[in-house]
Image (spheres, rainbow, N blue to C red):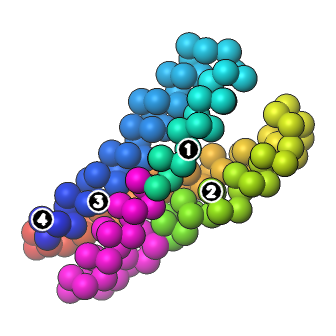
Amino acid sequence: MTAYAWLAGAWVAVLWFFTFGVARPLFAVFPRERAGEVTTALFPTYFIAAITLGVLASAVLWFRRRTPRDTYAFALQVLALAALVAIPLFLRPAIAAHAPGTPDFARLHGISMALNLFSLIAVPLASLVVLRSSKE
């Protein structure tokens, strides 16, 4: 359980820190275009870290599943992981093909933000379910 708690906690920390500790302050301090350039430059590191931690946490959870709650939490984690993988694999290339400020850019960026938001909520929720069921 310790490995899962550490990996899931690190995964949650990466998701939340980048979104609220890095991206949000950048857009609050810098002009939109410059903040977008900086966050775009940071995306590869963010996604590599988040996806790696997600794969590891999910693998540990897969092998330590003991209750139906663990299985539901695993499914939620896999959905969150799939959402994260879809962003750099499919959405980022599609977004890059459109100029900022265009309707297509805004639509794709909105989908990307929604998938990231889903992960921001789903990962801690799944982790809490697992950690709570392990104490019962």
Eye-nearest disc, 2 or 3:
2
Look at the numbered disc 4 and give the secondary structure of its residue: helix
Q: Earlier in the sequence, mark 1 or mark 2?
A: 1
Eye-nearest disc, 3 or 1:
1
Q: Which residue is mark 1?
A: 43
Q: Position of residue 8 (x, y in %)?
A: 29, 59
Look at the numbered disc 3 and give the secondary structure of its residue: helix
Q: Which residue is mark 4?
A: 2
Q: Residue at x 56, y 64 (%)?
A: 85
Q: Is residue 85 above or below residue 48?
A: below
Label 2 crowd bin: few (<14), some (14–19), many (20+), radius 10 Å: some
- Give the alpha-carbon distance from disc 2 to disc 3, as whole Å: 21 Å
Span colored in magenta: 49-78
Q: Which residue is mark 3?
A: 8
Q: Residue at x 25, y 85 (%)?
A: 63
Label 1 crowd bin: few (<14), some (14–19), many (20+), radius 10 Å: some
Is disc 1 in contact with disc 2, using a CB cutoff of under 8 Å?
yes
Q: Is residue 34 left or right of residue 48?
A: right
Q: Earlier in the sequence, mark 4 or mark 1?
A: 4
Specify whether residue 117 is in view.
no
- Give the alpha-carbon distance from disc 3 to disc 4, as whole Å: 10 Å
Q: Which residue is mark 2?
A: 88
Is disc 3 in contact with disc 1, using a CB cutoff of under 8 Å?
no
